[in-house]
Amino acid sequence: MVSSSAFQKGDVFWAPDPFRQGSNPRLWLVLAADSLPYPGQEYICAALTTSDLSSNYEVGNDWITGRNPQKTSYCSPWVVATIKDRAVVNPQGEITTTFTDRMISECTAYLEP
């Protein structure tokens, strides 16, 4: 399939946090791009954080590009948002498909009864 999205599953970018008005942009991991009704215009993403909470998942060596060696990144698979392409401030890098797929599984587990 030819992609029509600027970003793909596994990409990481900076965008505003829709849950904190007036806050600085945060990192988001793209969980879905081309499978959405408006590919290239919006992405389903999970929040990345530097908070080492017990339910977060450390990205660690799953960074392909864009890792900040001074900070440890974690993914919060229950903090999910649809981010519009026009809201993306800057690309950061890419995370492995293995880690991204695991975050998709963890995210969807929260939706199961």
Image: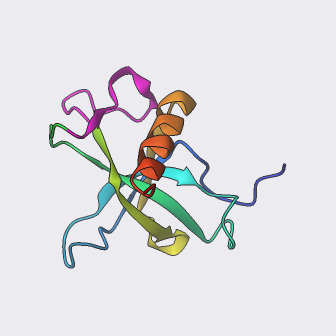
Q: State the residue in front, 111 or 4.
A: 111
Number of marks drawn? 0
46 in relation to 62, above or below: below
Q: Residue furthest top?
A: 61
Q: State the residue in front, 25 or 56.
A: 56
Q: Quadrant of the C terminus?
A: bottom left
Question: Horizontal and vertical percent for residue 30?
Answer: 50, 51
Rendered image coloring scheme: rainbow
Q: Is residue 41 left or right of residue 13?
A: right
48 in relation to 90, above or below: above
100 in relation to 35, above or below: above
Bounds of the magenta span?
Answer: 55-73
Q: Residue furthest right?
A: 1
Q: What residue sits 29% from the left and 68% below the top?
A: 17
Q: Quadrant of residue 88?
A: bottom left
Q: What residue sits 58% from the left and 54% below the top?
A: 32
Q: Residue furthest bottom?
A: 21
Question: Horizontal and vertical percent for residue 46?
Answer: 40, 53
Inspect the magenta stretch and tell me whether residue 12 lies in it: no
Question: Horizontal and vertical percent for residue 91?
Answer: 46, 51
86 in relation to 71, above or below: below
Q: What residue sits 23% from the left and 40% below the top?
A: 55
Question: Horizontal and vertical percent for residue 26?
Answer: 29, 57
Inspect the magenta stretch and tell me whether residue 62 lies in it: yes
Q: Quadrant of residue 45?
A: bottom left
Q: What residue sits 52% from the left and 50% below the top?
A: 31
